[in-house]
Image (spheres, rainbow, N blue to C red):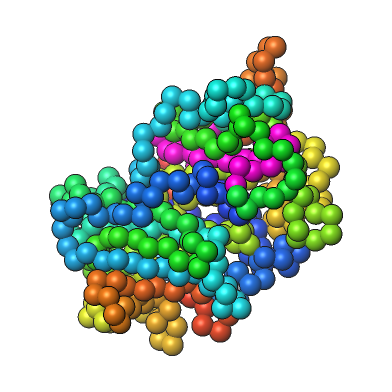
Amino acid sequence: MTSYRRLDPGSQPERLYEAYRSTIQRNPRKPLIQIPQTLSEVTGPLYGHNPIGETDNDLTRHHAGEPLGQRIVVSGRVLDEDGRPVSHSLIEIWQANAGGRYRHHVDNHPAPVDPNFTGAGRAITDADGGYRFVTIKPGAYPWRNHSNAWRPAHIHFSLFGPAFVTRLVTQMYFPDDPLFPYDPILQSIRDPQAQQRLIARFDLDTTEELWALGYRWDIVLRGHEATPFEE
Amino acid sequence: MPAFPSQTVGPFFHFALTTDAALGCLAREGARGERVHLVVRVFDGDGQPVPDAMIELWQADAGGKYEDPEDGQEIVPDPAFCGFGRLATDDCGVCRFETVRPGRVPGVSGALQAPHVNVNVFARGVLWHLFTRIYFAGDPANDEDAILALVPADRRETLLAGPDASVPGVWNFDVRLSGERETVFFDV
């Protein structure tokens, strides 16, 4: 049976991070109980979803017209901790529009809704773990966590990987955002190197001439526990 | 390169992740086993319902087989069963799955585990999703389950779904994210 390396808590956010107020009533006070991995944890759904549609990974083509905003291509590879590709695995993304507004009934930020932008996409990684989304750059948006609180621009990513324990829901940020130091969600990750992992890089090679800016973001999921039988 | 950090699912995931109500039904008509309506309620540390959580389930079919090649048991998977479920909680902090009681699957050193459903909990304010298990109250196998045995006896009840007092086939499971009687969450 495959087993997966345990996560170093230092590489992850602090669950109870008081600067992000909602964490206070929504996280356990007692320590988690460590359990061994069994078939229950090392298996996982293949997708558990409907088939992927042809334009699911192009968020600029979900309506009759084109959305407003800076057109971007976000691409990369999904790898495990040993650099092996995570192939044929579902990625789901969602984001605000260029004005920083989500297509969601709870979002009452008075920025305009874009009738040509929903902001949800899906893709399956290819044999090399590769993925590619076409979308627009989301705007920053205000929230009520603290006085004058703004979230840096980000795209939410949901990944499955091969097992229930490789599940990852995270956020991709854009380089050099001045809001980083003020964002308790990013700052809940204390290790600056771990924070950097969530920041995509601008990439001229995937920038498409006269069309769209390219951002590259490789994503790493939990890897296999080394055994004497592996290289 | 170490695995990447998690971040909260936030409050705005519904239009991307929980548009497919079919993911609330793991057992289609004809699925083998004892049909179970699993009602999951999520509460915060003040005992208030959490109306913006997302619950994901992963379980074996009634024969104890996971629908994954990693499960090498020579058991034919139930074609009417899908082991994965996903729903958002409603305004009352509740979501309702339709499934079957899972069979027993091998655990540590091959000993069979008690029937259980694996659960991931996501929500605004939860920066790193929480992992737990649902067991079924009164199942005689619970007493010999190696994972339950790792949980202090006075906290085991937080992992038990209980049969509804008025509706047969309905099982209730409460997730308490924080507080005196908070649910046991696991580090795997």
Residue B96 in view of the camera:
yes
- Which quarter of the figure has residue A115? top right
Vertical position of residue A164 compared to residue A125: above or below = below
Examine the structure image and report whether residue A85 is included in the region drawn in magenta. yes
The part of the image, by quadrant, that contains residue B94 is: bottom left
Q: Residue at x 40, y 81 (%)?
A: B156
* Residue B176 image position (x, y, % from top left): 51, 74
Residue A195 image point, x, y percent: 70, 48
Task: Identify the image quadrant of residue A157.
Answer: top right
- Quarter of the image with the C terminus of chain A in it: top left
Identified at 49% across, 39% down, the residue is A91
Q: Main secondary structure of the magenta part?
A: loop
Relative image position of residue A55 (x, y in whole percent):
48, 25
Q: What are the residue bounds of the magenta stretch?
A: A77-104
Where does the image place residue B14, in percent across and percent down from the top left?
Answer: 52, 49
Task: Give whichever of A40, A173 is nearer the camera.
Answer: A173
Q: Is residue B151 left or right of residue A212?
A: left
B81 within the magenta span: no
Residue with the most extreme top position: A210
